[in-house]
Amino acid sequence: MHDVIIVGGGIGGLYTAWRLATSTTLTVLVLEAEKEFGGRYLTCEMPGGHMAGFGAMRFLPSRHKILYKLIKDLNLDIEAFWGEEESKDKKLIGFYKNTPIYCEDDYRRVYSLTENDLPYLNPEDYDFQIKAPENGNLFEGTVRETGQKAKDMSLRQYYSYAPNTDVLGRSFMLHTMDISVAAAAMFAKKHKDFDPLEQDYCVKGGMIGLTKKLVSNLNKMDNVTLLAGEAAAEVTESGDVFKVATVSSAEPFTGKKLILACNRSGIESIIWNCPSRRNMEFRELFSNTISLKSTKVFLTYTDAWWEDVGLVSGRFETDLPISCVAARGGQGKMGGYATLLAAYTFTCSDVFEGLNQSRYERFKPSAGNVPSEYLPSQKLVDFVQQQLCTVFGLKSIPAPVGASIKIWDSKRVSGGSLSQIGVDSYQLQFKTLKPFPEAEIYIAGDVFFASTKDGAFYGWSEGSLITSERILVSHFGLSPFCTEVNLNNEFP
């Protein structure tokens, strides 16, 4: 009998176990479906050849307070990322409405803005307008003459104001309303309290190194048991005891409390046996969410040709189906191979329907060693190449010598879920911490992303850690791990 059973051995599950083990005497069991612990970050790593330089997510934005403290407490190093140096020449930082963006003035030109228009978002050809308050929080701004706050408007209402939704409503921060990265960056210049997506530092060894350190520490603790390759298949509630049956074990594991540190699809795959028909309750809970897909294409070239057209390092956003271009992990113009990432995320993932099917001829790499399941179709590579030409304003670009693709969709390790139209994901997040008052069931995964009431997106890692902290502090009586993070519900 364990005091706590944690289903899911990603960063959220491992962190929750580590906090319980170091702050309480509770016995903890962690069940991980895959053969290794690490969750999403294992699937982020691109195995083989010249794709491996991108690896698992390793960047550490300044707003990741819990993650930063965790890294320090585990005596891991934080280092400046080699590819974030500023270029001596003009650096291409965005691409909007068929216009390359190099600076703030370009933002204003694209959106037809003047200095007096800064409190407004009023793009040309868009019948839409938001007046932002002085704090720069656009979600609190009012929409045209309606008086409604942007965050409270449903997407259907939004469509009636803006037929083309590339500028607003792309759910980049996973809220019911949103503003493009370009416009957000413009407001960040004026409002210092707006936290832009800066990624100047990284965890030495990446997130894989962090999860390995957590696993190593947990394996040394007498009150923690880690079991990999144990996918939770069925849960039976019997009084105050949970019996968790897995695919691999003959006998179920028993515990007094159950923490689900996995995503929505992982939870929905579990069969629940209890008087209250838990399966239906979970379906009702998740009926307010939609699955989030994320697809990334890695193209390797013999030369970092993009450096000649302004993209030295880092990333920029676009308003094409290709939502993000990044140049990291290659050796650049100094020789050797260089890899470019093209990301299709959130609402842009539908461009891959029919493009990555087995009926299409697979791309044939001439360098690197990428497993067949990671090879995209030649048609998809051609599609990405055409979009890159548009982004950089070129008639042609060099052919890649290597290519791989990674898609997070409805699998156990997926892109997560975001709130449906008209539903506030922040409120849903607090509801799911302990969704059923009568049962010791908690959701510590990243099912819902928004971590603040204005829809701020902390990211998978920090968002999951914040959710875990809210459960540990509110329901297990632990002291906050990081006092800089607000764990309270900001709604009245």
Image (cartoon, grey):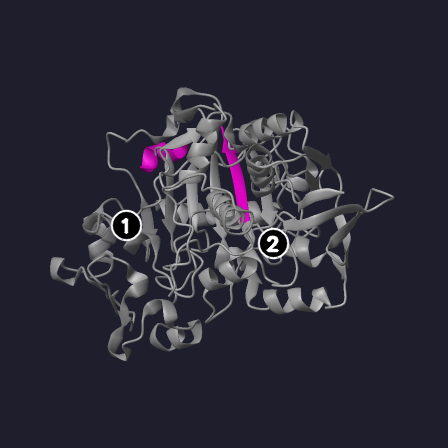
Horizontal side, residue 96 vs residue 215: left or right: left
The amino acid at mark 1 is: Phe
Give the magenta part as a residue range. Answer: 295-311
Mark carried by residue 162: none
Q: Nearer the viewer, residue 99 or 421?
A: 421
Amino acid on which the number 2 mark rests in the picture:
Tyr
Q: Residue at x 43, y 50 (%)?
A: 487
For residue 231, side relative to residue 392 (left or right) = right
Q: Position of residue 435 (x, y in %)?
A: 59, 62
Q: Is residue 85 rendered magenta in the image?
A: no
Residue 194's disc number: 1
Pick whichever, 253 or 65, lies toward us: 253
Q: Position of residue 436 (x, y in %)?
A: 62, 63
Q: Nearer the viewer, residue 398 or 181?
A: 181
CA–CA distance between discs 1 and 2? 32 Å
486 vs 371: above or below: below
Query: Helix, strand, or loop for circle 1?
Result: loop
In the image, residue 403 above or below residue 185: above
